[in-house]
Image (spheres, helix red, strand yellow):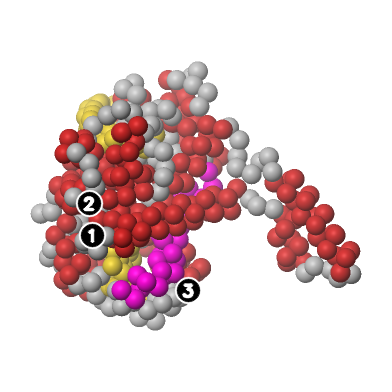
């Protein structure tokens, strides 16, 4: 079985060959700084239940460190360390000034009632807070598999209780509900980032020609594996905004396929209600969802979890482009096979960094204690109104109402968030592309992405005298 942590280290070591740094610094960058294991009891259902959790800090070249907390029975210390490492690299690529960390709690959230999950979450938070593993200045979690804005609100509340004099307490976690110091656009952020990175890729004709891909994102066919938060939003934005055709959705208990297209909203509602795609009437049900990897499509987006494309099935993949919306969905051995097949892969440390980009915006907003656009919105509206009146007076004609309304209403906070996210994704893509095309010995886009990240982290260590 492929080992996620070992594969991540292999990808890093492959990229380090192209970075002129010492062996000692390379080892420092590769090695996870610390992993804390906590075991705590919670009285539930008339008994004390003991839970095990982890918080890994991969790199503190910049602080705070940043990374989600997942609630999942399959999580373990090695997985958390691998995910923490990925956070360091993705932060570096898109120029988010954070180090990398990650957390996990070994639990099946579906086995517990909401009030029980709250008690467990708050106890876990207490264990992390008292070790400074949750702090706006040192370590900032966010949602991941099995968690959401609900859990982040509980953690933030627990931090506020324990650190009542911390004026920046709201910044101790990101991904909070909007009415609890959260940020509009955070829930959609990773999926929106996938949309922006796909759009940017199809603007680069030199890459398209090199890999024999046709131009324009419009009308491309798409298969998504995993219809959770990320897979759903990525599918929604690509189909609605870019006119991509969604033809397949794979889930852990089966998938659906329709070459004429699938309405993602309709499919999502059905799956949410029935917990399965069986008996879905708008597409063909496929009992083994993994078989969808063998279907012809332009774009494949694995959006669930690690190691879904391995040495065993990589050779059967028919997609021309893979965008890694999940963390580590392609194993090291599978990546080599896909390279030989000339499949272009946009790696997780670039493709799914939209979540941490918008988490950074939320953290900044919480530290500033004022929403984005608050100071300039009305001033800009007044200026545009004056300009419109001047133009109408000079021309003797009225500006069409739809254009006038856009100017006068001004820019909302969500517009600024999406604009900032788009800018960070484009800049990250272009930095990686530059590294990729400048050295023809670099085997793939993933290695180029790691090279960019490692160079930035090495530079940060150099500046602090390491």
Residue 133, how many percent across, how many down?
Answer: 33, 28
Vertical side of 333 occupied by 299: above or below: below
What is the chief secondary structure element of the magenta stretch?
helix
Question: Are dots 2 and 1 in contact, CB under 8 Å?
Answer: yes
Which quadrant is the C terminus positioned in?
Answer: top left
Instruction: Tell me the mark number nearer the camera, choosing from 3 and 2.
Output: 2
439 part of magenta stretch: no
Which residue is labeled 3 in the image?
Answer: 243
Magenta residues, start to end: 183-210
What's the CA distance linking mark 1 and mark 3? 33 Å
Residue 148, how many percent across, how many down?
Answer: 40, 44
Vertical side of 205 occupied by 163: above or below: above
Question: Outermost residue, top direction?
Answer: 165
**Helix, strand or loop at disc 3?**
loop
Residues 270 and 458: in front is 458
Which residue is labeled 2 in the image?
Answer: 18
Instruction: Tell me the mark number nearer the camera, choosing from 1 and 3.
Output: 1
**Toward which corner of the image does residue 28 lie, by quadrant?**
top left
Q: Give the residue at x 34% y 21%.
A: 130
The answer to whether residue 238 is visible is yes
Q: Give the residue at x 29% y 39%.
A: 458
Give neighbour class at mark 1: few <14, some 14-19, many 20+ (Cα, 10 Å).
some
Question: Which mark sits nearer the N-terminus, 1 or 3?
Answer: 3
């Amino acid at each position: 079985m492929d080992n996620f942590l070992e594969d991540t280290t292999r990808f890093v070591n492959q990229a380090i060959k192209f970075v002129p740094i010492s062996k000692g610094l390379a080892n420092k960058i590769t090695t996870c700084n610390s992993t804390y294991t906590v075991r705590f009891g919670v009285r539930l259902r008339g008994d004390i239940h003991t839970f095990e959790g982890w918080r890994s800090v991969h790199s503190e070249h910049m602080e705070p460190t940043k990374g989600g907390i997942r609630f999942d029975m399959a999580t373990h210390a090695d997985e958390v360390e691998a995910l923490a490492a990925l956070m360091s690299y993705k932060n570096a690529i898109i120029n988010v000034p954070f180090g990398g960390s990650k957390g996990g709690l070994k639990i099946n959230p579906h086995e517990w009632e909401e009030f029980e999950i709250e008690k467990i979450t708050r106890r876990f938070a207490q264990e992390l807070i008292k070790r400074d593993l949750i702090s706006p200045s040192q370590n900032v979690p966010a949602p991941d598999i099995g968690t959401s804005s609900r859990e982040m609100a509980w953690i933030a509340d627990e931090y506020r209780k324990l650190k009542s004099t911390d004026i920046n307490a709201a910044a101790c976690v990101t991904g909070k509900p909007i009415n609890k110091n959260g940020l509009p656009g955070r829930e959609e952020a990773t999926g929106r980032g996938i949309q922006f990175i796909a759009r940017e890729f199809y603007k680069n004709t030199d890459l398209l020609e090199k890999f024999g891909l046709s131009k324009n994102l419009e009308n491309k066919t798409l298969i998504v594996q995993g219809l959770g938060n990320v897979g759903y939003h990525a599918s929604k934005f690509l189909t609605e905004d870019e006119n991509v055709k969604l033809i397949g959705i794979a889930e852990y208990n089966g998938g659906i396929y329709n070459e004429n297209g699938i309405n993602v909203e309709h499919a999502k509602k059905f799956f949410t209600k029935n917990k399965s795609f069986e008996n879905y009437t708008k597409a063909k049900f496929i009992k083994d969802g993994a078989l969808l990897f063998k279907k012809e499509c332009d774009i494949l987006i694995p959006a669930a979890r690690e190691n879904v494309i391995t040495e065993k099935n990589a050779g059967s993949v028919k997609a021309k482009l893979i965008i890694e919306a999940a963390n580590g969905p392609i194993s090291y051995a599978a990546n080599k096979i896909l390279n030989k097949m000339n499949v272009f892969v946009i790696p997780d440390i670039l493709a799914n960094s939209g979540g941490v980009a918008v988490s950074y915006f939320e953290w900044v907003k919480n530290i500033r204690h004022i929403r984005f656009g608050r100071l300039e919105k009305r001033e800009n509206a007044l200026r545009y109104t004056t300009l419109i009146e001047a133009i109408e007076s000079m021309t003797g004609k009225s500006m069409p109402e739809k254009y006038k309304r856009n100017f006068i209403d001004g820019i909302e906070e969500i517009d600024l968030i999406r604009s900032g996210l788009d800018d960070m994704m484009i800049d990250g893509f272009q930095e990686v592309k530059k590294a990729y095309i400048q050295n023809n010995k670099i085997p793939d886009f993933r290695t180029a992405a790691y090279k960019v990240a490692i160079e930035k982290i090495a530079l940060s260590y150099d500046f602090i005298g390491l």
